[in-house]
Image (cartoon, rainbow, N blue to C red):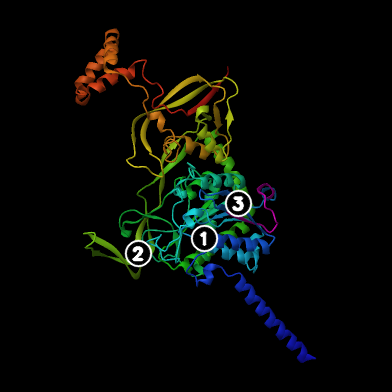
Amino acid sequence: MKQTIILLIFLLLINFTLIGQTLEKKWLTDFEKSNYTATSNYDETINYLKKLEAASPYIKLITFGQSPQGRQLYAAIVSRQKLFNPSEIKKKGLPILLIQNGIHAGEIEGKDACLLLLRDILITKTKAKYLDNCVLIVIPIFNVDGHERMSKYNRINQNGPKEMGWRATAQNLNLNRDYMKADSPEMINWLKFFTKWLPDFFIDTHTTDGADYQYTITYNISDGENQYPQTIEWIKSSLIPYFENKVEKEGYLIFPYVAFKGSKLEDGLVDWVPTPRFSNGYVPLQNRPALLIETHMLKSYKDRVYSTKFLIEAVIEKINDDSQKLVKMNKDADNWVIENYFYKKKPLPLSFSVTDKNKIIIFKGFNSIEKESGITGNKVLVYTNTPVDFNIPFYYDLNVKDSVYVPKAYLIPKEWNEIVDKLKLHGVIIDTVRTSEQAVVEKYKFYDVKFSNSSFEGHQRPIYKYNVIIDTLRLKKGDYIIRTDQRTLQIIVNLLEPLSQDSFIAWGFFNTIFERKEYFEVYSMNKIAEEMISENPKLKEEFLRKLQEDENFRNNSYMRLMYFYEKSPYSDKYLNQYPVLRIIKELPN
């Protein structure tokens, strides 16, 4: 009898082992099947996710748009409570973590890391606890068209996978420059998705270009002073130490993603606050923490995938531990932005610069040498395999470079409805003027307008200066009014203020206001100028003084006539005038 029982136990153990091996083989990813050297294509990726969905009730695969080449944009919603609607999730008070992969489709470690992670959560259940106090959303591939432009030659500086996707979309747009201006169909759909779900934490996975060093993985979390102080404190004192420790325990060196101050490492490293054209600059303007992951391009693809997976896992663990705290911080951040910049009238930072303050840090790099190059005709920097711990300055102190006081509201004429449509994508609440009210407004009048020599992301960006004019006017019915006492305050200001690097006007959406549409003939303008001088002695005096002081003006007959044309009632009063107005005070009728 005893021998029979032992035999049964032995057979059961063998059976369970075989089942486990079969299960493991069935759920191997293409990354694993290739001995960690390749990544799956679009169809293989989506089919794997559909297989997960068929096997588990805790995952739902949804689409949130279509690419220019007709591919669906997929997101996997993963919830232990089987909540796949954002309003239901928020009612339960659960934080939502959005993980985005493949915005630069050649930098695709995050996709393979997430497939492994989802298998651990849903199939083997070794990481099932990650769903205890958190809902995950995984975008496996954002730039789906670029992903399918696969080649082993797409990333000249990168060590694998065997074939990888392309950086830009099928329309040659860089999605990680498109968060504010929203030119691409992919980004338009993403913004609608983001606005609908409004995640509590965001992760964007990438691979570096640039210098060689010992760290397998680097990261950035924006901590500019335009963000809720309690959130920044949680990030710095709790989140970062937690995930740095966890990743290093797994055997991977980790370091913040920083920039070189000069051409050499020895010149030092500088901290930075990303502008909102980037994912990790945009999401903080929505009052939510955003983690940028940058694995090192020269490390093996296997190490890049697994280090990404371990960092994501550490963040999920921390969010589970601090789930209610994170949800509350985000709500408080929404209120803090309004209180700080609308009611207390503190200047809102738009850009930052680094000061000369620094501290000496240890940076784990590689020894480098300069070699003469017959190709370049100069010396070329070459990295060796010799690890070196460098003591170098780190410039950490960031000051506000540009800021602006937030008005009560912005007014956009109804003919600029394209701008209004883009604002709505960001979750901005917009009203229309219903009665003919009066208001004190600030107008921007531009001068010294120049344009970039080449286009950038399909836009000819203007460079300008401007004056501020205060006026009292009557608002027109049907025009759009954007009040700033709403949670998207920072998005509104950064999109509408000319001082912002990623405003609509800085991106060239208002370039027609800089174009002159009416012109004078010399014989007409000369006669009018003579009449103006004879009727206005002060104008004549100013003209003669300018002739004396400005040689270029004196020798240019067209400029001399233009001087009078611009002062005449025939000139275009709207030329170089920003159509968006800042409402400072609304007046009773």
Q: Is residue 465 left or right of residue 92?
A: left
Q: Is residue 29 above or below residue 266?
A: below
Q: For residue 26: magenta?
A: no
Q: Position of residue 46 (x, y in %)?
A: 58, 59
Magenta segment boundaries in residue numbering: 74-88
Residue beneath the point at 37% across and 63% down? 212
Quarter of the figure with the N terminus: bottom right
Secondary element under disc 2, as helix, strand or loop, is strand
Sort mark 2 into few (<14), some (14-19) or many (20+) by Cα contacts within 10 Å: some
Q: Is residue 260 above or below residue 494?
A: below
- Alpha carbons under labels 1 and 3: distance apart: 19 Å
Which label belongs to residue 390? 2
Residue beneath the point at 68% across and 78% down? 16
Q: Is residue 47 left or right of residue 149?
A: right
Residue under label 1 = 110
Residue under label 3 = 63
Q: Of the residues tagged 2 and 1, which is closer to the observer? A: 1
Residue type beneath disc 3:
Thr
